[in-house]
Image (cartoon, helix red, strand yellow):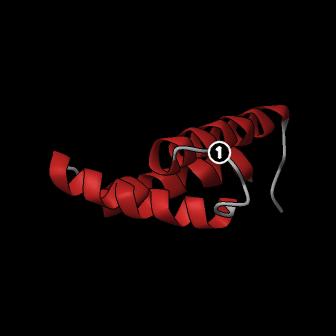
Amino acid sequence: MLKMTPENQARAAAASQALKAYQIAKNGTADRLSQSMKETLIDLLSDLRHFADAAGIDYDAADRLAVDHYECESW
């Protein structure tokens, strides 16, 4: 079961702000009618893969570490 601790609530809030900033950077607006947060998340994850390729970062390795962090923070 996911622990929504105050720290995890703060992490989720920071991620929400990052998604809104990405939506503005990509679409020129944070208007949720232009794209759902789910669609924005999918676009961001896809674009982060492109970024990782351009920067020489192993995206899959970074994602595996991110999952490990998430699990440690959540359970």
Across and down, in percent, residue 19 comes to 59, 46
Left or right: 14 with respect to 41?
Answer: right
- Element on which disc 1 rests: loop
- Which residue is painted at 84% across and 32% down in the image? 6
- Which residue is painted at 60% across and 67% down in the image? 39
Depth check, front residue: 36 or 9 = 36
Depth check, front residue: 13 or 1 = 13
Across and down, in percent, residue 4 comes to 84, 46
The mark total stands at: 1
- Which residue is painted at 27% across and 59% down in the image? 50
Name the quarter where the N terminus is drawn.
bottom right
Across and down, in percent, residue 25 comes to 47, 41
Depth check, front residue: 7 or 46 = 46
Instruction: Answer with the quarter of the image where residue 48 lies.
Output: bottom left
- Which residue is painted at 42% across and 58% down in the image? 63
Q: Is residue 75 above or below residue 28?
A: below
Across and down, in percent, residue 32 comes to 72, 55
Which residue lies under the disc numbered 1?
Answer: 30
Q: Residues within 10 Å of mark 1 (few under 14, many from 20)?
A: some
Type of the residue with mark 1: Ala
